[in-house]
Image (spheres, rainbow, N blue to C red):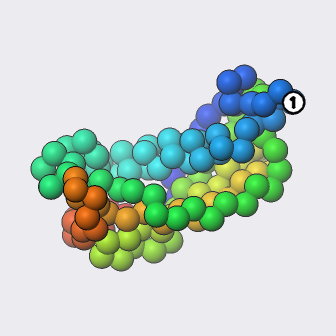
Amino acid sequence: MTHRFDLRVYYEDTDLAGIVYYANYLKFIERARTEFVRSLGIDQVALREKSNGFVFAVRRVEADYIAPAKFDDELSVLTATEVVTGARLTLRQGIKRGDQELFVAVVTLVALTDTGQPTRLPADIRLLLQ
């Protein structure tokens, strides 16, 4: 399953040349991950409150910047699950303008408690993410 999140590049997302500032791609994929999880029916606030403060935390990001996005571009962020283990989730996320791929990232998330300790993903969450 691939989740799609559409967005438009605003002036605030760009540098002086009108090109998306590199760190903003990470913001774009973060928003898309949030919407991906929401689309699965996972309420992250409720999950945190009922399960020892369970949260997803980014452990690793491997990113390739292929081509620049520019002011006023309409972009799509595509998110797909690659690997789900007991306490880890790996997603592939790509940003496209139409059919042109601009950015690709492999993001590894881990499950943590409210004290920052690693924990297992709840079984029902693992099933939804697979």
Question: What residue is disc 1 on?
Answer: 17
Residue 89 percent location from the top left of the image: 41, 68
Q: Residues within 10 Å of mark 1 (few under 14, many from 20)?
A: few
Three-letter code for the amino acid on which mark 1 is drawn: Ala
**Quarter of the picture holding the C terminus:** bottom left
Q: Is residue 19 above or below residue 32?
A: above
* Camera-nearest residue between 113 and 74: 113
| Residue 105 drawn at (x, y percent) | 63, 60
> Is 10 placed above or below 86 here?
above
Q: Is residue 54 above or below residue 35?
A: below
Residue 101 appearing in the image: no
**Residue at 38 percent of width and 50 percent of height:** 37
Left or right: where does residue 95 sit relative to residue 88? right
Q: Secondary structure at mark 1?
A: loop
Q: Position of residue 108 (x, y in %)?
A: 48, 66
Residue at x 52%, y 64% (from the top left corner)? 60
Which residue occupies 57% across, 42% down?
Answer: 27
- Relative placement, left or right, of 99 versus 6 is right
